[in-house]
Image (tube, helix red, strand yellow):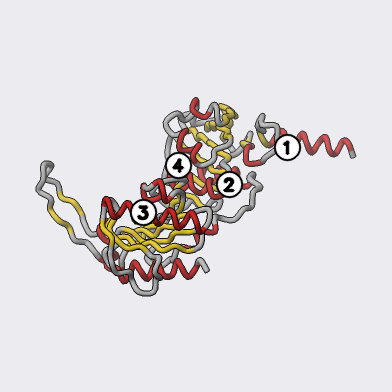
């Protein structure tokens, strides 16, 4: 029995390169021999909240805002083509919500990588989150098969089976722009009093066939495409502690609109007497409704009927 246990431990040690964090969290294990023809040539290098700046100085502060705990870095190189390299960073955040948050802020314009709870990729990069882990893979040359295979291998080593943040499901799917839902750890819509929350982007029905272009004869004399940005609007979901904090946040927003924007005297039908409607100087037309410990609203819309339909459905999903 003891021999069997020893052999099992030895196999695991050969198959994975562990971390020095004092635990066996599989999310912090980099494959020692991940793919045929590839070798781990650098790392694992470990970082914590005090040393993260040594690795990603420019973005460390953003990670810390999303509950960063620790991370591990490794670089893999192709044995026959040394110019082909893939770097991997595995970050442990404070929760699945925070892992989604940093992923939502950094994901790339591309396609889904089919890894973890959510992913995005292009020819040289693949980002995904699973449980409370956020993972980035970067390749020196286009290497889609290797990127995907290595990402799946890392994902399989993450035992955390937490589901995605429940708030994502509160966003109606109709006209929702793909991969547009983001989680902000603070300052939703740029307002500190709204604190943390989600934002999703919606596109009007007319947008699908809109191809209008307007020539802008300004200093650069360029041709700018319009219509898309004008027809987009946001559904926002601010998360507060309780009804009292929700009331205070709504009151602060009302005061802000009185000073900097506009307040509408008439509230759209069916939203209740506590709803707030007006114009934000940076986000255009807004309608905000308190719902328990949430503030739900739409901002930047042109078609009010469409925006209010989206808002009403989101409120219904909160019940």
Q: CA distance from mark 1 to mark 2?
A: 27 Å
The 10 Å Cα crowd at callout 1, few under 14, some 14 to 19, many 20 or more, is few
Q: CA distance from mark 1 to mark 4?
A: 28 Å
Residue under label 3, please give it: 253
N-terminal-most mark, 1 or 2: 1
Q: Nearer the viewer, residue 52 or 260?
A: 260
Residue 192 position in % (x across, y down):
40, 46
Query: In this rendering, would 209 be left or right of 314?
Result: left
Q: CA distance from mark 4 to mark 2?
A: 24 Å
Q: Which residue: 40% across, 55% down?
A: 180
Residue under label 4, please give it: 125
Q: Which element type, helix, strand or loop, lies under badge 2? A: loop
Give the farthest residue toward the right: 1
The answer to whether marks 4 and 2 mark residues whose Cβ atoms lie closer than 8 Å is no
Disc 4 or disc 3, which is closer to the eye?
Answer: 3
Residue under label 2, please give it: 95
Disc 1 or disc 3, which is closer to the eye?
Answer: 3
N-terminal-most mark, 3 or 2: 2
Q: Which residue: 17% across, 57% down?
A: 213
Q: CA distance from mark 3 to mark 2?
A: 29 Å
N-terminal-most mark, 4 or 2: 2
The 10 Å Cα crowd at callout 3, few under 14, some 14 to 19, many 20 or more, is some
């Amino acid at each position: 029995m003891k021999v069997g246990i020893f052999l099992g431990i030895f196999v695991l040690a050969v198959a994975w390169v562990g971390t020095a964090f004092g635990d066996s969290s599989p999310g912090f294990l980099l494959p020692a021999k991940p793919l045929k023809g590839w070798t781990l040539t650098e790392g694992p290098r470990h970082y914590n909240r005090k040393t993260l700046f040594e690795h990603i100085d420019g973005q460390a502060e953003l990670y810390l805002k999303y509950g960063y705990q620790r991370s591990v870095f490794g670089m893999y190189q192709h044995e026959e083509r040394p110019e082909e390299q893939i770097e991997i960073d595995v970050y442990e955040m404070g929760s699945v919500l925070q892992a989604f948050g940093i992923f939502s802020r950094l994901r790339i314009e591309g396609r889904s990588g089919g890894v973890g709870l959510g992913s995005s990729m292009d020819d040289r990069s693949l980002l995904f989150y699973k449980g409370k882990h956020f993972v980035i893979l970067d390749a020196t040359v286009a290497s889609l098969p290797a990127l995907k295979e290595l990402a799946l291998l890392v994902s399989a080593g993450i035992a955390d089976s937490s589901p995605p943040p429940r708030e994502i499901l509160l966003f109606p799917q109709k006209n929702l722009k793909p991969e547009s839902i983001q989680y902000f750890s603070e300052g939703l819509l740029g307002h500190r009093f709204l604190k943390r929350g989600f934002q999703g982007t919606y596109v009007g029905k007319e947008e699908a066939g809109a191809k209008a272009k307007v020539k802008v004869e300004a200093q650069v004399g360029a041709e700018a495409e319009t219509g898309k940005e004008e027809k987009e609007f946001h559904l926002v979901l601010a998360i507060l502690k309780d009804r009292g904090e929700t009331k205070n946040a709504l009151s602060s927003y009302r005061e802000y609109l009185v000073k900097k924007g506009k307040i509408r005297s008439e509230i759209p039908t069916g939203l209740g007497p506590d709803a707030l409607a007006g114009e934000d100087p940076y986000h255009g037309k807004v309608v905000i409704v308190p719902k328990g410990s949430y503030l739900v609203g739409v901002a930047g819309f042109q078609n009010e009927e469409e925006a209010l339909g989206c808002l009403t459905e989101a409120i219904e999903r909160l019940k």
